[in-house]
Amino acid sequence: MVSAEGWTRGGPMSRLEVWDSERAFERARVAYRFVAANFPDEADLEVLAPYTAAAHEAERAGDWPAYEDALRGLMRTARAEAMRRKAGAA
């Protein structure tokens, strides 16, 4: 199943998909653009490291659900850090 954003929702057959480098590049481009737009400049980049590492591991394994989950985690972390900074500034 594909969500409104075009992200694949993992199902029992999703691990059998053939790795598509162009699709992977597009997903990463969207995720890192989001991070660049939302992650505070003064925030510690180390909070993003586990998600970047997980995306690389999933890419090497050809595991789409894990790859997309890692990129989603990257975006969620960037958003959470931005919200945390915004709440602290208020």
Image (cartoon, rainbow, N blue to C red):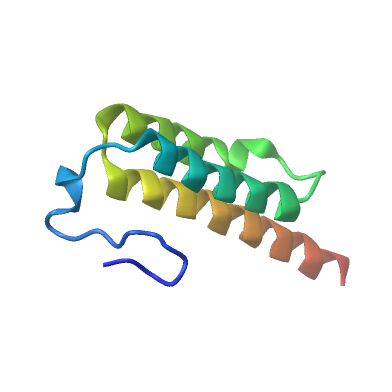
Relative to 42, residue 1 above or below: below
Q: Quadrant of residue 43?
A: top right
Q: Nearer the viewer, residue 80 or 19?
A: 19
Residue 53 appears at what percent x and percent y? Answer: 45, 32
Residue 50 horizontal/vertical position (percent): 48, 38
* For residue 90, side relative to residue 2 (left or right): right
- Determine whether, in the image, residue 1 is placed left or right of residue 55: left
Q: Quadrant location of the C terminus?
A: bottom right
Q: Residue at x 74, y 53 (%)?
A: 37
What residue is rendered at 63% in x and 61% in y? 80
Seen from this angle, which residue lies furthest top? 60
Q: Residue at x 78, y 60 (%)?
A: 85
For the point 43% across and 72% down, which residue is it? 4
In this view, which residue lies farthest toward the front? Answer: 22
Looking at the picture, tell me which residue is in the foreground, 88 or 23.
Answer: 23
Residue 33's x, y, as percent? 66, 48
The quarter of the picture where residue 12 lies is bottom left
Q: Quadrant of the N terminus?
A: bottom left
